[in-house]
Amino acid sequence: MTNKQTIAAIVPAAGVGSRMQHNAPKQYIQLAGKTILEHTLAKLSQLSQLRTIVVALSDSDPYFDELPTLDKRIVRASGGKERADSVLNSLLFLAPNPPAWVLVHDAARPLVNISDIERLIDECIRADEGGILASKVKDTIKRGHTHALQTVPRDDLWQALTPQFFKYDELKNALQGALASGATITDEASAIEWAGKPVKLVAGRSDNIKITTPEDLDLAGFLLHKQQNESAL
């Protein structure tokens, strides 16, 4: 890989995951004998393209250093109050020797398919523009509060997934500008959109779920078992 294509991964993991109703952050909940974070990092570790994997953690996080030996490319950085702050802190952590591209992935998405990530990387580098994994919305979508007011056409609706993959400089500048302006940034793509840059949509598997609630954990256990059985064939 040429220097032009160097890639670092960022895993924002400083949140507490209150919706999981657990006494530890959700990334440390056990799933099939390992923490969710271990499963996620094991997936990313399969990508030989990655030069570094930065995990953004709360400075008071007592759990990460107790995990079993991880990939030597994995390093710890200080997280922030919100996801965008953690990603920006990680980008600044990388600033002394910045990569050309960064791959940002949710700590609580351990089921991501490696071939989806490789396709995202390949398509974005070939197009020379950033992009995200996403899946087409399948369900009928309603707009409203306590009552349905409108059925929203779904032909051009996508569910944003991760990883999200952007040029280092573009993402750093977009996050700094968007946060300084007070814009609401829910993912990296929203910062890039705020900056007026293109965001390529790359179709990914819809079972790349984010574990947010206790019922998600049950589903993730089933899907992980299915994945492991398929890889053993």
Image (cartoon, helix red, strand yellow):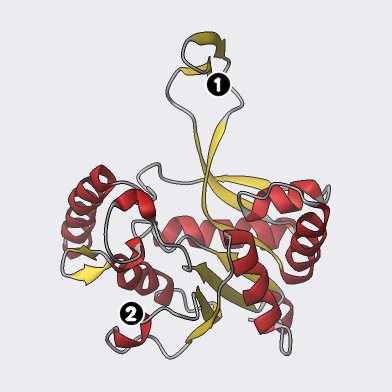
Q: Mark 2 points at which residue?
A: 63
Total marks in image: 2
Left/right of residue 91 with respect to residue 27 in the rendered view: right
Q: Is residue 101 visible?
A: yes
Left/right of residue 8 with respect to residue 221 in the rendered view: right
Disc number lying in front (2 or 1): 2
Who is closer to the viewer here, 2 or 130?
A: 130
> How far apart in space, not on screen, are marks 2 and 1 (Cα)?
41 Å
Where does the image place residue 70, in percent across and percent down from the top left? Answer: 35, 86
Q: Name the residue under label 1.
A: 154
Secondary element under disc 2, as helix, strand or loop, is loop
Q: Badge 2 local density, few (<14 within 10 Å), some, or many (20+)?
A: few
Secondary element under disc 1, as helix, strand or loop, is loop
Give the mark, 2 or 1, whose residue is nearer the N terminus: 2
Q: Are marks 2 and 1 in contact (CB under 8 Å)?
A: no
Left/right of residue 113 with respect to residue 57 in the rendered view: left
Q: Badge 1 local density, few (<14 within 10 Å), some, or many (20+)?
A: few
